[in-house]
Structure formats: structure tokens, C-alpha cells
Amino acid sequence: MNQIERRDKGLAYVCDDEAFAQQAECRKILQQLNFMDRSDFDGIKEVVKQLLGKSDEAFINPPFYCDYGFNIEVGKEFFANYNCTIIDVAKVKIGDNCMLAPNVAIYTAGHPVHPDTRRSYYEYGKPVTIGDNVWIGGNAVVLPGVTIGSNSVIGAGSVVTRDVPPWSIAVGNPCKVIKNITEADRKKLFKDEEIDAEAWDDIVVNGFGGEG
């Protein structure tokens, strides 16, 4: 196998000239994205679509950083805020209606632990999967091989080292589940504060108030 094939199978590989050429194409698009007029919202959406290859109303607030772009798959209404980084050596699959706060980092790449082996320039990539309706708070880091279940929230500053089940609030370093999200949380805004009546009426009218 060549190094690209090894990389894409999740095996140890060396980032060779072919991989660097793929990264160079990505960086050309990132150069355009990261130096665009920040008020050109429609233009940003078009460049994001070019970068990711497939998107449905995805929006990324520049600056944004990744290695390849084509290894990032996002669902409908994806949003990433300023200064996010996705090291997409392996596949990063993100579901519908997901939000990344500023400075979120998703890493699929890793290196051998032993220093002699690490000096060989061999590395690896392990995929990250994020379900639907996930919100990842600012400065959170998601490490290689992690799956985050649908409808979960990752607290700001967390380091996600292992899988997070659906419908969970998980925080900390290492990130741990602190509670499940239930119907009792539907009207919550900030801590114990509830959404005001006017806003809640609007939410219900637009179909987001649940069945009750």
C-alpha cells in the first residue's frame, strides 16, 4: 500500500509528498476563507461548500483550520464559530444541527508514544463521529476515535477522551457525564433560569416546543 492508502485505512503512515499536495489544495481554499470580507455571509457559505465538498446551509466563522477538508462531513445547518480547528487525517462525521463554539478543536491525528518510534515520522488517524443536535462549548478538545451521541452538550474547556452517550451533558478534563438531558430541561435557558414567555411562545409556534 502507498502512504495515502495506509492513512485512509487508519494504519501507521508517513505524510509524504502526495499527502502534502492534498493539504496544499486545502490550504488554498482556507486562504480564501480566512481572508474574506467577514460580512460576506453568502460568499463564506459558498467557500465552505467548496472546502467540505458537501454541505446544506453550513456556516463557519473564519478563521478556520483543517488539513484536508474532504474528510469532514457535516449535516444540515452546521455552524462553527471563530477559530475552530479540525485535524481531519481520518474521517470527521458531524450530524445535523450541530454547533461548535469558538476555539473548539477536533483531532483525529496521533503519534506513537515512544520517542524513537515517533521520530520515524509515522503517525495515524482515527475517526471522530458526532451525532445530531450536538453543542460543543468553547475551547473544548475532542480526541481521536471519540464518538459523541446525538442531543448531547459538551461543556466549555472539556477534553473529550472517550465516548459520550446520547442525551448527556458532559464536562471536564477528562470529560465525564454529569447529567442526562430530560424533558425538564426543555425550557431551561441559563442554569435555573427559564426562557421568558414571549420567546417560549415563539418557540412553540415555530414547532420547537415539543408535544406538550
Image: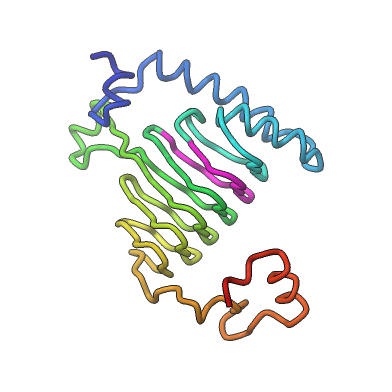
Q: Image quadrant of residue 32? A: top right
In the image, taking residue 46 as reference, residue 111 lies left or right, namely: left
| Front residue (pair 211, 151) | 211
On screen, residue 135 above or below 68:
below
Asked whether residue 87 is drawn in magenta, I would say yes
In the image, taking residue 127 as reference, residue 35 lies left or right, namely: right
Q: Residue at x 51, y 35 (%)?
A: 66
Please state the horizontal and vertical placement of residue 145, each as a whole percent of the image.
31, 46
Residue projecting furthest to the bottom: 192
Please state the horizontal and vertical placement of residue 211, each as a whole percent of the image.
57, 72
| Front residue (pair 208, 33) | 208
Q: Residue at x 66, y 65 (%)?
A: 207
On screen, residue 148 above or below 189:
above
Q: Image quadrant of residue 197? A: bottom right
Q: Residue at x 39, y 68 (%)?
A: 172
Please state the horizontal and vertical placement of residue 166, each as a whole percent of the image.
38, 62
In the image, taking residue 65 as reference, residue 113 lies left or right, namely: left
